[in-house]
Amino acid sequence: MPTNGPDTIFREGLSEGKINIQKCTDCNRHIFFPRVHCPHCYASSLEWHEATGKGIVYSTTVVHRKPERGGDYNVALIDLSEGVRMMSRVEGIAPAEVSIGMPVIAFVGDVDGAPGVLFKPSEPMKELGNE
Ligand SMILES: [Zn+2]
């Protein structure tokens, strides 16, 4: 595998705190996971763009884990506004309170010891305003 392949470019973006996804310049669709060819039209004219990070929870599952191993966590499929679906985790909220249709925002966080894409609710932030 070439070291400058799409997976590497994606991971390098994450290490800089950026969530980069590809867009096919032939059919104008966004693509995730990173690929060499567009899965829709098989063109290889793919451009990288930084994702907006805005998403909606498509499905959500609570994975039960013993408290001494970190407690329950959430696995969710998120539809990004670019039209791609990511499997990830929604943090900053109890795992069971993540609901389908919830607006979320992506951020780069620690996933199993490496930078990865996580999500948090994009509802009003308590720290800001209402004074
Ligand atoms: Zn395409």
Image (tube, rainbow, N blue to C red):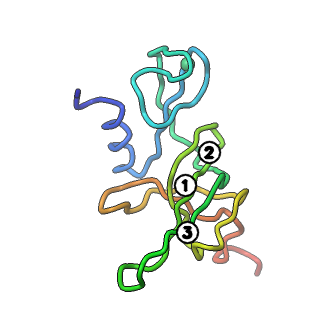
Q: Earlier in the sequence, mark 3 or mark 2?
A: 3
In the rendering, at what x and y percent does residue 29 appear? 60, 26
Dividing the picture into quadrants, the one containing residue 95 is bottom right
Q: Amino acid at mark 2?
A: Leu
Residue at image position (51%, 51%) is 87
Q: Quadrant of the C terminus?
A: bottom right
Residue lying farthest to the right in this orientation: 130
User: In the structure shown, which secondary structural element does the residue marked by tag 3 occupy?
Assistant: strand
The residue under label 3 is: 62
Q: Find out whether the residues at labels 1 and 3 contact each other: C-beta distance under 8 Å.
A: no
In the rendering, at what x and y percent does residue 37 appear? 44, 20
**Between marks 1 and 3, how big is the CA–CA gap?**
19 Å
**Between marks 1 and 2, how big is the CA–CA gap?**
9 Å
The residue under label 2 is: 80
Q: Where ligand 1 lies, by quadrant?
A: top right
Q: Amino acid at mark 3?
A: Val
Q: Find out whether the residues at labels 1 and 2 contact each other: C-beta distance under 8 Å.
A: yes
- The answer to whether residue 115 is above or below residue 85 is below
Q: Report crowding for label 2: few under 14, some 14 to 19, many 20 or more residues within 10 A (C-alpha).
A: many
The residue under label 1 is: 106
- In this rendering, the label closer to the viewer, 1 or 3: 3
